[in-house]
Image: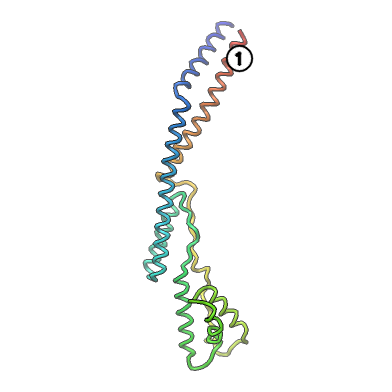
Amino acid sequence: MEGKGIVKRQQIKRNLGLIERIKTWQLLILLVLSLFVSATFLRLNRVGLNERMQAVVSADEVGDIVVMQERLYDLQRYAGSHMNAQPEDIYLTHQYERDVKNIVEQAQAKNAEHSNILKLADDACRPHYSGYTQGYVQCVRVEQEKYPPSENPSDSISLPNPIQYRHTFVSPLWSADFAGWSVVISLFFGLLIIIRLILYAILKLMLKRQYRAI
């Protein structure tokens, strides 16, 4: 029995020696370095996202529909394939205002020969709003509702819903890019440190019990 105990103690010591070859401070240094690399790549993902969001905003200001669609597609593709690239909802504010302006101007031109509800609503709202904003649209709708239905279908127009100009994108929790793999490496080093500490404590406890059994 004593011989078996000696063999077991020697085996525990060998295992402890293997664990002690890898120092905790060495693993901590690797963990810190990997965390720094992960943070750098995650930040780069965010920078790339912001650049594409700004490209959408710029295209919206210019008003080129084709370019705007290309920028939106580029943003959607980037956000969908990169972690830490979850953008806020994009509102095509300028395109919305342009569309509202066109609808209002077309309706006014069509009914220029006679007074109509739209003109009355526009006259009531125009002094309070600059441009064809959502506030202006809401004001026009409220003013239109004050008048009874007109026999002239052009007197009341249907303005676009602002929700149609909102674009939502989803970023994955993890992506197979530099940021994603650097995060995996950081998690690996963190898990390795925890496992080493647990195994070291268990082997120390087992060795202590072996000596008590002598």
Q: Which quadrant is home to the C terminus?
A: top right
Asked if residue 150 lies left or right of residue 95, the reply is: right
In the rendered image, which residue does mark 1 sit on? 209
Of residue 70 and residue 116, the one placed in the foreground of this image is: 116
Q: Residue at the bottom extreme?
A: 113
Circle 1 crowding by C-alpha within 10 Å: few under 14, some 14–19, many from 20: few
What is the x, y in percent for residue 36? 43, 40
Q: Give the amino acid at mark 1.
A: Arg
Asked which colour scheme the image uses, the reply is rainbow
Name the residue located 53 percent from the left edge and 30 percent from the top edge.
194
What is the x, y in percent for residue 102? 45, 79
Of residue 2 and residue 206, the one placed in the foreground of this image is: 206
Q: Please tell me whether mark 1 sits on a helix, a strand or a loop.
A: helix
Residue 18 lies, with reference to residue 95, above or below; the image says above
What is the x, y in percent for residue 73? 41, 61
Q: Residue at the front extreme?
A: 127
Name the residue located 48 percent from the left edge and 37 percent from the top edge.
187
